[in-house]
Image (cartoon, coloured by chain):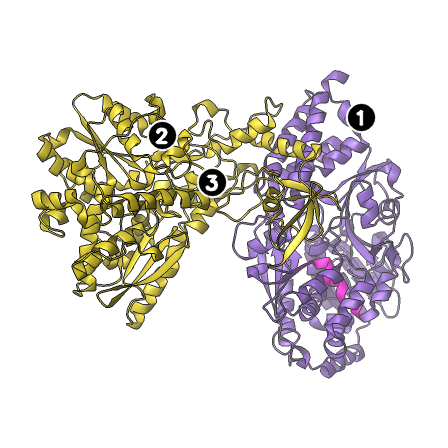
Chain colours: A purple, B yellow
Amino acid sequence: MPKFTPAELDAHRAKLAAAPRKRAIIKVGLNTCGDAAGALPVYQAAKEALQASGLDAQLVRTGCAGMCGLEPLVEVQVGSDPAVMYGRVNAEAMREIVAQHVGQGKAVDAYRVPSIADMCCEPPTPGKQYRIVLRNCGVIDPESLDDYIARDGYQALKQVLTQMTPEQVIAELEASGLRGRGGAGFPTFLKWKITRASRPGEQKYIICNGDEGDPGAYMDRSVLEGDPHSVIEGMIIGGWVIGASKGIFYIRAEYPLAVERIEKAIRQARAAGLLGSNILGSGFDFDLEVRLGAGAFVCGEETALMASIEGKRGTPWPRPPYPAQKGLWGQPSMINNVETFANIPPIILRGGAWFGAIGIGRSKGTKVFAVTGKVKVSGLVEIPMGTTLRQVVEGICGGTPSGKPVKAVQTGGPSGGLIPASLLDTPISYEELAKLGSIMGSGGMIVMDETDNTVELSRFYLDFSVDESCGKCAPCRIGGTQMLRVIDRVLAGKGTKQDIATIKRIALTMQRGSLCALGQTTPNPVLSSLKYFEHEWNERLVASK
Amino acid sequence: MTTVKAIINGLPVEVPEGTTILEAAKQVSVKIPALCKHPDLHPTAACGICIVRIKATGRTLRACCTPLEHGMEVITHDPEIVAVRRGIVELMMSKHPNECLTCARNQNCELQTMCADFNIEKSDLDSIVPDLPLDESTKAVSLDPRKCISCGRCIQVCQEMQNVWALCFMERGIETRIAPAGDISLAESPCVKCGQCSAHCPTGAITEYDEAPTVWQKLMDPELHCVVQIAPAVRVAIGEAFGFPVGTNLTGKLYAALRRMGFKAVFDTNFGADLTILEEAHEFVERFAHGKSELPLITSCCPAWVDFMEKYHADMIPHFSTCKSPHEMVGALAKTYYAQQAKIDPQRIFMVSIMPCTAKKFEIQRSEDMRSSGYQDVDVSITTRELARMIKQAGIDLRSIPEEQPDHMLGAYSGAGTIFGTTGGVMEAALRTAYKLVTGANPPRPDFTVTRGLKGVKEGRIEIAGKEVRIAVAHGLGNVESVLERVRAAKQKGETPPWHFIEVMACPGGCVGGGGQPYGATDELRVKRAQGLYQEDTAGLWRCSHDNPYIQKVYADFLGHPLSEKAHHLLHTHYIPRPVYQR
């Protein structure tokens, strides 16, 4: 592929739009979730059925459309009819769908599930999804640069390089109110601004944090697998704004498909002149490389992540100096999360004000959640900030499969907390969730019904954090283990009131004394269980028997 | 200099920009406790005990690594902060063996002190001490990983200060422990036995390999004739264990104490230092003035440096002085010259070295050359810390004991000999004698002060008989690399070497900062200890090693002349490249 100039990029997009389309399009979700659910034989069945029948249809592998619990997902669109989504499709069903729907234009109702269009709404509407980050997931072939370009891909990059100043980009981000989607919620514009101002002219690095590790959370994996170019485009723009010539994707090694697709996308972008030297003829040089995380949860913490890239033991370091001052290899560096980067191109194209109009308070735009646990439809949902927990759990995800009442929702993974059913009408925002003793986190959301026990759930999270403690600082290293021992005493029916006091004492030591957020937040699931479900603890104590 | 003004505990402070809260608090007489922070090392923020509260946000931050900012209001102590600090110490203790009474650091342990301060009387936490084996493989330093609190000081010391890379963290979380990479023993690791890890450890996790019991046993053996020698740096540091002001020179009292402990003859390593200078200065003059073999000449009296060089810089072997270290020279002469003169069967002589050093424990058996007398020249080497304990065990009141003289045959020394104990001292002493050898006269001013002070690498130019002698002095093994790189670069290009003579001591400050010295050394203490030695140098009878009449006598009576065949046999050694990993 020749290297694009801005005009050639536009011309290429126009050519793609004008290209003749097949009568029908069949999209099979082939992210890790689809593959695990058996989508590959489904794809194969579609391919064979199309070959055998000679039907005029295009078969596309896409990323995940979101309803992972209904995988394998297949979307069929015939002529100008609205697309129909099928769930839990097997090879047999696929052949039926090809024959009936593609062949005769009759949808197969037995497998029908809500389509992406059914779930989403424009403009943003309460109780509905609104997809900015997931705009291309399940829609395009993630391995096709053309598919991305056809959906306004690299248009934002072109706009930035040809029409904007870095300050203007920062101003748009400020207007958008976008905050870090990794969990901490630091204003993105400020991070970009500080890093741009830091040590001008020196080597800088931009890093994408793809070390997603919360149990049950896989938003970033889905974006990396389903729309790799959107993250790359966000990174290139960020690199240009802060003055970095080099970017690094730090992706956990347990995400082989994400790594494969990102690497392929990097190669495609490089070949098209969207990465490398003189990007889009602008004179801007920028390239990306992928580094694999070796499986330590704490390497999602930015200082530990940089230590890991440098080949050192992945342990956090005190800040200041902040990465913007002295980061990777001692140079100014900026780390953003996958979802944050994926938000950048739409903000540039539609304007910061558009994004800033979505959401509530200081929480703007949308947030992607991975909803799992006791819900009818588990998977990814992208909702405008301000949507209530109830709308997500009972509305979008259909409530509990058993019909039993929801007991609690856990957000923020091992760093988060439990929110009892009585508070389900809380609107989702950084501030509101923090008020309840939980956090937004990176987007894990686990729903529990009344058969679940929060003591056991909090033990599960604590065990996870203890296992993932890097061991550097004493409060986290020893505190977590000791707390776990006390909880096990309680779970064994040997606990006393004194043990609860001990748990709280250790928790305070960890919260105040730990160096990084992992240790500081490790007690959160336990504390929120104690706060909202104290009776579940008391029931197990010796004295109350 | 830009300063920042801030408030600590309601009191105004003004400090240079970049000053940490921990340092700034001292200005208002506030001591913030910390366990992992050491004045020699940059903060790693591991322990969490130094947390303070930022009033504006209510957040707690680590004082050790957080610079005070303009207008910041800091609270260093409130009930919650104290509770958290206490909580951290309690957690540490739950993973630390309750063996204080039988620990080498009893009453001299930073963790124990912290426990006392926070009154950790009892805890309802389970004891979760890991079952990890003791590593005594080096017979120089002992590593008891059970007692480790993972502060990371030893690792910083080993990797950054000393550039040795023997120790690292293994595993993670609660399993985190210190060990050589690959879980090999310390003896198989790159460890050079400098013992700086033990000198910086806040607990008893790394200590000297204790050989005091062996010494007591030998002293009880009527068949043996136990003799002893004291290294220069010991005399100005041991007083710290007895409440003397830092840097107090206790030479005479130590001689007396050692005799009371049962040693038949009390020698002084300073005599060996003088002898080393005679040999090494001749070696230098042969190379410098007579062009025999390569320059620069590099000193070899530090056994940790020798081990480091053989492992990491074996290409420098041709540059190394072949002189043994001073205590080995005294050991060799004790079992030959002294045995002959005193008419004692050398087989009965048991030589104990009192050293500021853990590496000497390793050195005494490092090669066959250390048996030049036909017996092991030095039988046991103990550290200043071990001697301090032995003096206490012997019930000797060091404060009131009258001073005595050494056995002069191997005990008299010059000022040049005594300054061996500090960085730059060997160089200064050697220059005094080299000057004499080249010009025939003593230097008009024997103080070559360019060699002094605690700068990591000191460079100087000295004129001897119209010829410029360029010297470099490095201390702390982490400072060696840059010096050797310049030597290598010059050699590769065929240029004249950047220096003619290089002194290296493994420990910061030289032997006064040795790995076997009393705990708590900082630069402030190292300077005071060195001052004690410089004072003795100026006050002494002789300033130059060659003026020591007992040195002249040993050559006249026994050795012949410097670099004689006999001197070579007894006082010199050789070096071989050694693998960094022994396994």
Count the labels in the image: 3
Mark 3 or mark 2, whichever is nearer to me = 2
Asked whether residue A336 is drawn in magenta, I would say yes
Residue A453 at least partly seen: no
Residue B119 in the image: x percent, y percent?
Answer: 60, 25
Front one among A300 and B8: B8
Q: Could you say whether the residue bearing mark 2 is in a helix, strand or loop?
A: helix
Circles 3 and 2 on the same chain: yes
Q: Residues within 10 Å of mark 2 (few under 14, many from 20)?
A: some
Nearer to me, B24 or A195: B24
A500 to A111, vertically: above or below: above
Residues at marks 1 and 3 on the same chain: no
Q: Mark 2 points at which residue?
A: B388
* Residue at 34 percent of width and 25 percent of height: B400
Q: Which mark is residue A535?
A: 1
Q: Is residue A141 above or below residue A406?
A: below
Q: Gap in Å between the C-alphas at discs 1 and 3?
A: 42 Å
Residue under numbered circle 3: B178
Image x and y of residue A537, in percent: 76, 26
- Characterize the magenta stretch by its predominant secondary structure: helix
* Mark sitting on residue B15: none
Q: Residues within 10 Å of mark 1 (few under 14, many from 20)?
A: few
Mark 3 — on which chain does it sit?
A: B
Q: Kindly indicate the quadrant of the structure image that contains residue A410.
A: top right
Measure the C-alpha gap from mark 1 to mark 2: 59 Å
| Amino acid residing under circle 3 | Ile
At label 1, the amino acid type is His
* x and y, in percent, of residue A332 in the image: 62, 63
Q: Position of residue B69 (x, y in %)?
A: 67, 52
Q: What stretch is highlighted in magenta?
A: A335-348
Question: In the rendered image, is residue B196 in sight?
Answer: yes
Sequence-wise first label, 3 or 2? 3
